[in-house]
Amino acid sequence: MRPHPAHRTVALTAVLGGLLLGILDFIWIKFLPYPVAELGNSSAVWAVAAFGFGYWVRTGWVRAALGGAAALVIAVPGYYLAAALIQGDDWAILWAPTSLLWMSFGVLAGVIFGVGGVWARGRGWWQTVGLALPGAVLLAEALIDARRINHPNYGIAPLWDALIKVGLAILVVVLAGRTARSRLLALATSLPLALLGFAAFWLAGFDGT
């Protein structure tokens, strides 16, 4: 059995991984073509990154939660650092109120999905919920995209965003699951969780219009 990563390794991975996530996210948005580039604007993708961190940690809810939160918080200044260096954005954005708001969202998502990654390694309903979380958050964002279809500000373009996220939702559950049964249960569970996620996005102001 593969040994669990040491605490120092977990901490270092959270810091460097978060910084790399933010930098690569900006590069992804700036240089890749639409509609793939739109994934860089996805909060769900960052949540899935926190899930991946917890899945790698394998055990220990507390360190998965702390590491996941730290990674997403650090990713925010990493993103704006890349924006400042690559396209000359104002350095003040690093400590602007909007950056602090995104960091606060990062704490919440990092804790939930970091722990979810550990749950996905477990057994029983914990495993099912953990595996369902990354698919659910991607499906929730797909619902937001679907609401934008044919809106005067968006046209038909959000259809492609929604389809890509649905495909990724299925893919991440299939890759993280270890048996066909666990994957099917997780996919089924992700549907009601996606509705809860959509409601959370709506309450946070991401109403899709």
Image: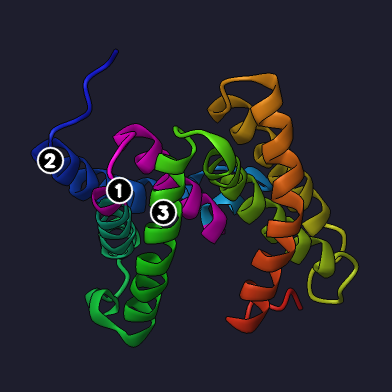
166 to the left or right of 123 = right
Q: Residue at x 69, y 21 (%)?
A: 180
Q: What label sits on residue 26 in the rendered view? A: 3
Q: Secondary structure at mark 1?
A: helix
Q: Of the residues shown, which amino acid type is indicated by label 1?
A: Ala
Vertical placement of residue 80 versus 138, above or below:
below
**Residue at label 2?**
7
Q: Position of residue 22 (x, y in %)?
A: 34, 54
Which amino acid lies under the numbered mark 3 shown in the image of this protein?
Phe
For label 3, the crowd category at 10 Å Cα-Cα, with few meaning under 14, some 14 to 19 and many 20 or more, is many
Disc nearer the start of the sequence (3/1): 3
Q: Residue at x 59, y 34 (%)?
A: 172
Residue at the image point whose x is 31% and y is 55% from the top: 65
Could you tell me how far apart the alpha carbons at marks 2 and 3 are, in whole angstroms?
A: 29 Å
> Could you give the CA–CA distance between mark 3 and mark 1, rounded to whole angstroms?
25 Å
Helix, strand or loop: magenta stretch: helix
Q: Secondary structure at mark 2?
A: helix
Q: Which residue is mark 1?
A: 64
Q: Secondary structure at mark 3?
A: helix
Span colored in magenta: 41-64
Q: Position of residue 129 (x, y in %)?
A: 58, 47
Other residues around mark 1 within 10 Å, as few (<14) / some (14–19) / many (≥20): many
